[in-house]
Image: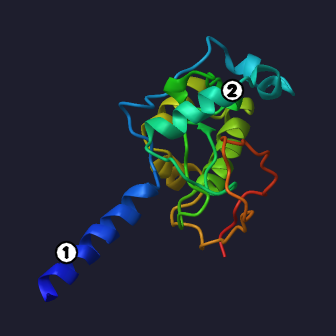
Amino acid sequence: MYILGALVFLFLAQAVLAQQPTPILPDAKLTPGDTFDVTAQDVCVPGYAKKVRAVPAWLKRQAYAEYGITQYKTGDYEVDHLIPLSLGGSNSIRNLWPPSTKTSPWNSYVKDALERKLHKLVCAGQLDLKTAQREIASNWIEACKKYVRTSPPAPIVHETKAAPATTANERRRHDSDFKAR
């Protein structure tokens, strides 16, 4: 009886964990990154990213499906551009992935701070656009340590809505850059 109980527990634990993958880094086979053919001058024009943003709901659902995310609450994940639009990233599925907003300390909010920092450096002429694209695509956490801060940010808990989502909703991010405490 004890063995049967242990097996049931292991089965249920695996089922629960398998339902909600929490990708911190994208799978390079699924999301290697992809860019538009643009220059630093192009991406530094105010409003550039808004002008080129075009990710339809079906493509967001495809990104969730590729990463095995079948159930989630609104706000648990966001379909994000690995190489952000502000750095010339494209809207291709090769550049989309669903990072969690819940993982700690590395999550989509922290990546947003890195994106803003790299854009600022590129537009100030302090970092080459191709270098910024390569660094964020190869390992955004290491890029964050290099350009934003050397240690992980303090965990931040963000509330989510209770209603389950049926489609991938991309939200606008207004959080300020995280700061060392």
Report if residue 116 is visible in the image.
yes
Q: Which amino acid does the dot numbered 2 rest on?
A: Val
Disc 1 or 2, which lies upstream in sequence? 1
Give the residue pinned by disc 1: 7
Residue 148: image quadrant is bottom right
The front one of 154 and 17 is: 17
Q: Position of residue 181 (x, y in %)?
A: 66, 76
Q: Reply above or below: 2 against 48.
A: below
Q: Position of residue 52 (x, y in %)?
A: 76, 20
Q: Secondary structure at mark 1?
A: helix
For marks 1 and 2, give the one nearer the viewer: 1
Q: Which amino acid does the dot numbered 1 rest on?
A: Leu
The front one of 77 and 119 is: 77
The front one of 37 and 69 is: 69
Task: Determine crowd level at label 1: few under 14, some 14-19, many 20+ residues with C-alpha closer than 10 A.
Answer: few
Seen at 74% across and 30% down, the residue is: 123
Residue 118: image quadrant is top right
Q: Position of residue 56 (x, y in %)?
A: 70, 25
Q: Reply above or below: 82 against 128.
A: below
Seen at 46% across and 57% down, the residue is: 20
Q: Position of residue 100 (x, y in %)?
A: 56, 54
Give the left or right position of residue 30, taking residue 79 as reference. Answer: left
Report if residue 125 is visible in the image.
no
Q: Secondary structure at mark 2?
A: loop
Residue at the outermost front position: 1
The disc at residue 55 is: 2
Q: Reply above or below: 156 against 176.
A: below
- Distance from Cα at disc 1 to Cα at disc 2: 43 Å
Seen at 31% across and 64% down, the residue is: 14
Assign the N terminus to one quadrant of the image: bottom left
The front one of 99 and 74 is: 74
Colouring style? rainbow
